[in-house]
Amino acid sequence: MGTRAPQGLLLLLLLRLLPPRGASAGSLHNPGLSECFQVNGADYRGHQNRTGPRGAGRPCLYWDQTQQHSYSSASDPQGRWGLGAHNFCRNPDGDVQPWCYVAETEEGIYWRYCDIPTCHMPGYLGCFMDSGAPPALSGPSGTSTKLTVQVCLRFCRMKGYQLAGVEAGYACFCGSESDLARGRPASATDCDQICFGHPGQLCGGDGRLGIYEVSVGSCQGNWTAPQGVIYSPDFPDEYGPDRNCSWALGPPGAALELTFRLFELADPRDRLELRDAASGSLLRAFDGARPPPPGPLRLRAAALLLTFLSDARGHAQGFALTYRGLQDADDDPAPSKGSAQTPAAPPDGTNVSCSPRPGSPEAAMGAQVFSTVTAVSVLLLLLLSLLRLLRGRSCLLAPGKGPPALGPSRNPARSWAIWYRRPRGVALPCPPGDPQVEGLTASYRPLSASSQSSLRSLISAL
């Protein structure tokens, strides 16, 4: 399985596979409304918030109310897993598919899977039964203790087959679309075995095949379908070092629209270039430090040549992009919400921006004005609030929740000691020893001496 075919033979095999065909919803040439570009839906950011098939099950709990469990918005402060103040299905632990917590049942069940029809990686055709007699995929097979999804895809590409199937974590089978036509689909959760060669990937199950199109993660190809998906080399594995891959993109139409669904390159030396296939001129270039803009990217070119280059240290997840041909270069000229205009790139491939560059005089002046206005506004609000609260009083408690525990002091002396407690609430009690504040020190902490002094000065000025 480790033998590499000559690039010319590989290109010929890919060209045989590329004409559009009406396979399953996961076909690379029919991405449809897919919301997932990883086979287990770890990248799902949709809005389904009920479990079960098509959301017909139980309502999900909000992720900011699940602190008693392993995953909550508090455990994902950077939003890397998509958790937050919502109850949408997610897959933070790399499970078989997105799931969510539910109200615990009498049987002790507190989470369930979400079956989301639109969360289906293009190129992954699904989980199928394999009884072995006859095998679900009739072509060559092999086993490996280092099996990953891409190892199997590469093996079947070299053998000239259209489909690759992984089973039981270590077995690889090759086949054709005629095999798929007689295949028996199984539940997605049946393909739950970890690949022996990659703990973050799933390689089928016991008697279950996870089947892919072999063009997933190919290093070159000629894409002519009206719409489709292009993955970085070796996807869903990470791309390797010293890759030099090219894809010719020529769907019917006078212009193209690209949308990047995933983009993660290791560093600025790993680079994706978009060139006009007719003139060879560079239209856009993206790298590890300059990712593509969010939303659709419209290019006034009938055909593109995409080239990906990685350096000797390159290792990262890579990219997944969808494309579609536009019949007229002037179709929908005004970019829709979230789309990006695409001015021609300068000769060196640097991206163009109309915003002030960080460190420029315009940016520095704008930041200084904003900071000054904000500081003055906050100070005025603080002074007005304290003046309103403290007029005629020498002591006040303003707790974060519930009614005030203390009233104004009758002691005319203006000696202040300030205490506070988290998460909210500030106490301005009378001097220590006053019977109104007995017991506060158990639940409040004193401000530092410098803060005490500053606040006393402010109060005295009022």
Image: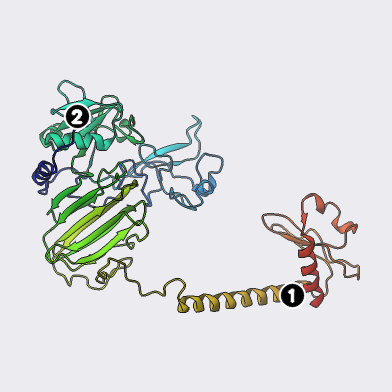
Q: Quadrant of the C terminus?
A: bottom right
| Residue under the point 80% across and 72% down | 457
Mark 1 neighbour density, 10 Å: few (under 14) some (14–19) many (20 or more): few
| 3D distance between C-alphas at marks 2 and 1 | 77 Å
Give the percent coordinates (x, y) of residue 207.
26, 24
> Which sits in the foreground, 128 or 194?
194
Give the percent coordinates (x, y) of residue 129.
23, 28
| Residue under the point 47% across and 75% down | 363
Q: Earlier in the sequence, mark 2 or mark 1?
A: 2
Residue 388's disc number: 1
| Residue under the point 37% across and 59% down | 289
> Which sits in the foreground, 406 or 387?
387
Q: Which residue is mark 2?
A: 173
> Which sits in the foreground, 356 or 192?
356
Q: Secondary structure at mark 1?
A: helix
Mark 2 neighbour density, 10 Å: few (under 14) some (14–19) many (20 or more): many
The type of residue carrying mark 1 is Arg
Give the percent coordinates (x, y) of residue 219.
20, 47
Q: Quadrant of residue 369?
A: bottom right
Cβ atoms at labels 2 and 1 below 8 Å apart: no
Residue 423's disc number: none
> Which sits in the foreground, 117 or 414?
414
Give the percent coordinates (x, y) of residue 291.
34, 59
375 to the left or right of 10: right
390 to the left or right of 347: right
The type of residue carrying mark 2 is Phe
Q: Quadrant of residue 381?
A: bottom right
Q: Secondary structure at mark 2?
A: strand
68 to the left or right of 334: right
Front: mark 2 or 1: 2
Q: Quadrant of the N terminus?
A: top left
